[in-house]
Amino acid sequence: MRTERREMNKLISNNPAKNYSRIGEVNISSQAEVKKKVALAKRAFGSWRGIGLDGRIKHLQKVYDVLYRNRKKISKLACQEMGFPIAQQEIFDIGDGFAYFEWYLKNAKKYLTPEITFQNKKEIHKVYFEPVGVAAVIQPWNFPFCQWSWAVVPNLIVGNTVVFKHSEEVPLTGKLIEDLIASSKLPDRGFGEGYGDGKVGEILTDQEIDLIAFTGSCRVGQLIYQKSAKKFIKVLLELGGSAPGVIFEDADINSAAEHIFGARFTNNGQACDGLKRLIVHKSKFDEVVTKLKQTLESKVIGDPLDPKTDFGPLVAKRQQDLIVAQVSDAKRKGAKVVIGGKIPDKPKGAYYEPTILTNISTKMRVWSEEVFGSVLPVVSFKTEEEAVRMANDTQYGLGSYVYTKDLKKAERVGSKIKAGMVSVNGINYVCPFNPFGGYKQSGIGREHGRYGLHDLCQIKTVAANK
C-alpha cells in the first residue's frame, strides 16, 4: 500500500497516520498542461523581470501575507499528508518557511544591487545580477512549506518565473499553496504548478526551461544533471545526506545528547541534513547511549495532529518498508538494538519505533546508505584521526556535527570533514543568511544568502567610462 496512487488520472493523497485513509485528490498534470504552464511562465518572464526588484518585492509581500493568514490550514494539511508532528511542524516547517521568506524580502536588495568592482577618474566597472529565465523547481515532501519557500521565493525575487512540482506525497498541500498564491493576484502567471509523480517531473524538465532547481535523491539528481548538461542550462541540486556527529571525550554530554535528539529525530528522522551516524569517543560511549535511550523512552508516538506527539508516522508505507529492510540488514550482520527496532502494534499506519543501534559495521546498510527515518547507529572511536576517517566514510557530504569544549579542535576537525556545513556544539547552521549545500553526492550549488541568490542569476560585468 502506498500513501498515494493513480486513479483515473487522479493523484490520491492518503493519511499515513490513519492507516492510509483517503484525504483527497488532485488532477495529474498532462504533458500538454505542463507544456502550457512553461509557455505561460516564459511569456510572463519579460514583464516579471521588467517590474524590477522593488516591484517584485511588493508583489511577493502580498503572497507572504496571504500565506501567513492561512498558515494554520497549511500546517494541518501538511501534517495529515506526511505525518510531521504538528508541534514540530509549526516551528521547523511553517515557522522557518516564513522566516526565510521574510529574510529574502528584507535582504534581496543588499545582495542583488549592482556591485562596483573598480573605478577611477575615467572608468567604472559594475557586476549585475540578472534573472536566468524560467526555472523548473521540483521539491520533496519532508518540509512541505519550507521547501517551497526555500526554492521558489528566491527564484521569483531575482526575477525568474517558476513552474513548480511538489512531491506526489503532498499534492494537496501543493495545491493549497498554488491556490493561495493565485488569490494574491501575483501578476502575469509568474508562478505555475504541475501535479504528479516523477513522470510529471520528467515532462517538466524536458521543456524549454532555463534552470532546474531540484531537491531529492542522488539517483534522480544525477539524471537531472545529465539532462541539464544536454540542455546546457544551470542546475541547482540539493541531494541526500548522512551527516556524522562526532562526540569527543571533553564534550558536555548532557548538552550534546539534547541536541542530538533534535538533530536526528525531529520530523521522525526525515531531514536531509539530519545527524544520521553518531561517532562517540570510547570513554563516553556508554554514557551517551544510555542518555539517548532514556530520552527516547520518555517520548510519545501517536497522531501527528496531537501537540503532545513526539513521533508521528513516516511519510508512506514504502518509507516504512525501507527502514524495516535497513534495520533488518543491520540485525542480521550483528547490530544490537538498544531501543526500538520494529513497527509498533499501535497506531496503525506508517509508524516505526525510534531506534538506537550499536555494534555497527561499515558493511551495514544503516552505515553506508542514507537512513531517512528515526534510526540512529552509534559507533565508538579512540583517536581524532579515526573519528575524521569514520565521519568521511560516506558518499555524502551535506551536514556534520562536532561536540567538544576545545574550539581549536573543533575548527581542526571541521576543516577535515568533507561536508558543506559543520555545527559545533549544537549551533544551528541552517539559517537564511548561510549557504546551504554539500560536497560529493550531496549536490551542486548552494541555496540561501548571497551565494544562493547569485546561483539563480546570470552574472554580468559592465565596464564603462564615466
Image (cartoon, grey):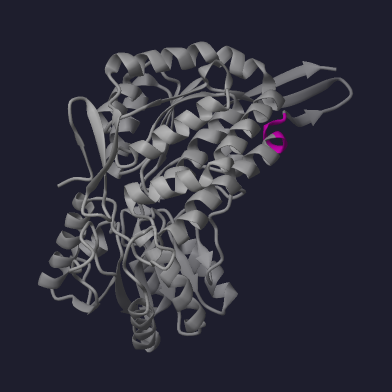
Instruction: Specify the farthest residue to the right.
Output: 121
Residue lying at 64% horizontally and 43% vertically, measured from the top left: 102
Residue 386 at x, y = what percent? 36, 74
Asked whether 347 or 189 is in front, the reply is 347
The spot of residue 238 in percent (x, y) is 41, 43
Residues rendered magenta in the picture: 109-113
**Residue drawn at the location 34% of the way across and 87% of the way down:** 286
The residue that appears at 31% across and 58% down in the rendered structure is 394
- Frontmost residue, 326 versus 185: 185
Q: Quadrant where the C terminus lies?
A: top right
Instruction: Tell me, yes or no, whether the highlighted magenta stretch contains residue 172.
Output: no
Who is closer to the viewer here, 428 or 437? Answer: 428
- Number of numbered labels in the structure image: 0
Task: Indicate whether 220 appears above or below 134.
Answer: below
The picture places residue 418, in percent across and down from the top left corner, at 42, 57
Q: Is residue 111 magenta?
A: yes
Compared to residue 54, the image places residue 303 above or below, namely below
**Relative to 3, is 160 on the left or the right?**
right
Looking at the image, residue 326 sits to the left or right of residue 225; the answer is left
Q: Residue furthest left?
A: 332
Residue 138 at least partly seen? no
In the rendered structure, the answer to whether residue 154 lies left or right of residue 225 reads right
Q: Main secondary structure of the magenta part?
A: helix
Instruction: Describe residue 292's horizontal placement relative to residue 431 as left or right.
Output: left
Among the 4 quarters of the image, the one containing residue 199: top left
Q: Is residue 186 shown above or below 198? A: above
Residue 73 pos. (x, y %): 47, 44
Residue 364 can be seen, yes or no: yes
